Amino acid sequence: VQCKVYDSVLALGPELQAARSLSVLSALLALMALPLGLAGAPCTGCARGDARSKARVSALAGTLAALAGALQLAPPSWTAHAVI
C-alpha cells in the first residue's frame, strides 16, 4: 500500500469510501449511546420508579456502543486483510 494524494473525496477508492462511511456511522452510534447510557445509569433520576425501563435503556445503550465498536473495527480489519 502506497500513500496517494487525492484531489477530491470522490476520487477515493471504494474501500476508503466504505471505511469513511463506517467510521462516520460508528461515531453517530456512539453519540447516540452516550446519553442513553447516562440516562440508564442507576445514579440518575430518569425514570426513577421504573427499574425495568432503565434496564432496557441501558441494554440499548450497550448494544449501540458494541455496534459502534464493531463498525470502527471493520475498516482496519479489511485493510489488514488486503495487505497481509
Image (tube, grey):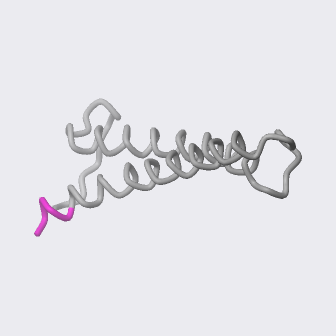
Q: Residue at x 27, y 44 (%)?
A: 16
50 to the left or right of 34: right
Q: Position of residue 65 (x, y in %)?
A: 52, 51
The magenta span reads 80-84
What x and y, as percent, mark residue 56?
62, 42
Residue farthest along the bottom direction in this orientation? 84
Question: Which one is in front, 46 or 19?
Answer: 46
Tell whether 57 sits left or right of 9: right
Q: Quadrant of the C terminus?
A: bottom left
Q: Position of residue 23 (x, y in %)?
A: 42, 46
Number of labels in the image equals: 0
- Which SS type dominates the magenta stretch? helix
Q: Nearer the viewer, residue 23 or 64?
A: 64
Q: Is residue 41 magenta?
A: no
Query: What residue lies at 29% left-to-right and 48% top-to-bottom?
Result: 5
Instruction: Please state, as top left, top right, bottom left or bottom right, where the N terminus lies in the image.
Output: bottom left
Q: What's the residue at 85%, 41% (across, down)?
A: 49
Q: Which residue corresponds to the image point at 21% horizontal and 43% vertical from the top-left?
A: 15
Residue 14 is left or right of residue 58, and the answer is left
Q: Is residue 77 left or right of residue 46?
A: left
Q: Quadrant of residue 6?
A: top left
Q: Position of residue 25 (x, y in %)?
A: 45, 39
- Is 25 located above or below residue 59 in the figure? above
Q: Quadrant of residue 14?
A: top left
